Image: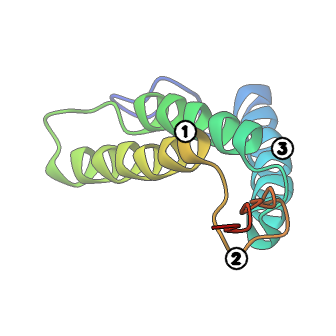
Amino acid sequence: MRAGCKLPLVGPHLINSYRLWRVLSDTGLSVHAFGYRVRFPALALALFSVAAGFLFHGQFGDQNQFAHLLKNISMAGGLLHIAAFGPGALSVGRKPVYVAPNLA
């Protein structure tokens, strides 16, 4: 193990977390690219980003690791914004807005 690292350099934990990251990033990013049903994948990616940040960049004394931790937290903030407010006006998954005609 490296000094200060919670996981071994090679092992089942690192390999399984890499596989989970690949599945989440591939499906989540492809869903976000089209804007179709983005709330749940954005929430899953935000939770994974925070967990991975604290797991892999939890050395608060090292300035470089702390910067990477803040990067993961800021990415999670953007993903939580997408999870809270949904895709956007120009996405595939938007709901149509009905505007009543003015009869006056």
- Determine the residue positioned at 51% across, 41% down: 80
Other residues around mark 3 within 10 Å, as few (<14) / some (14–19) / many (≥20): few
Label 1 vs label 2, nearer the camera: 2
Percent from the top left, x then y, of residue 22?
80, 52
Residue at x-position 52% and y-position 28%: 51
Mark 2 surroundings within 10 Å by alpha-carbon count, few (fewer than 14), some (14 through 19), many (20 or more): few
Q: Quadrant of the C terminus?
A: bottom right
Q: Earlier in the sequence, mark 1 or mark 2?
A: 1
Residue 85 placement, left or right of 91? left
> Which residue is the site of mark 2?
90
* SS at badge 3: helix
Q: Which residue is mark 1?
A: 84
Mark 3 vs mark 1, foreground winner is 1
Q: Position of residue 73 (x, y in %)?
A: 37, 42
Query: Is residue 42 shown to the viewer in this render?
Result: yes
List x then y, in percent, for residue 92.
85, 69
CA distance separating discs 3 and 1 = 27 Å
| Earlier-in-chain disc, 2 versus 3 | 3
In the picture of the structure, the residue carrying the numbered disc 3 is: 19
- Give the residue type that dot 3 points to: Arg
The residue lying at 33 percent from left, 43 percent from top is 69
In this view, 18 is above or below 97: above
Q: How is the image coloured?
A: rainbow
Q: Amino acid at mark 2?
A: Leu
* Front one among 65 and 69: 69
In this orientation, which residue lies closer to the viewer: 37 or 78?
37
Q: Which of labels 2 and 3 is toward the front?
A: 2
State whether residue 1 appears in this view: no
The answer to the question of whether label 2 and label 3 lie on touching residues, with beta carbons closer than 8 A, is no
SS class of the residue under badge 2? Answer: loop
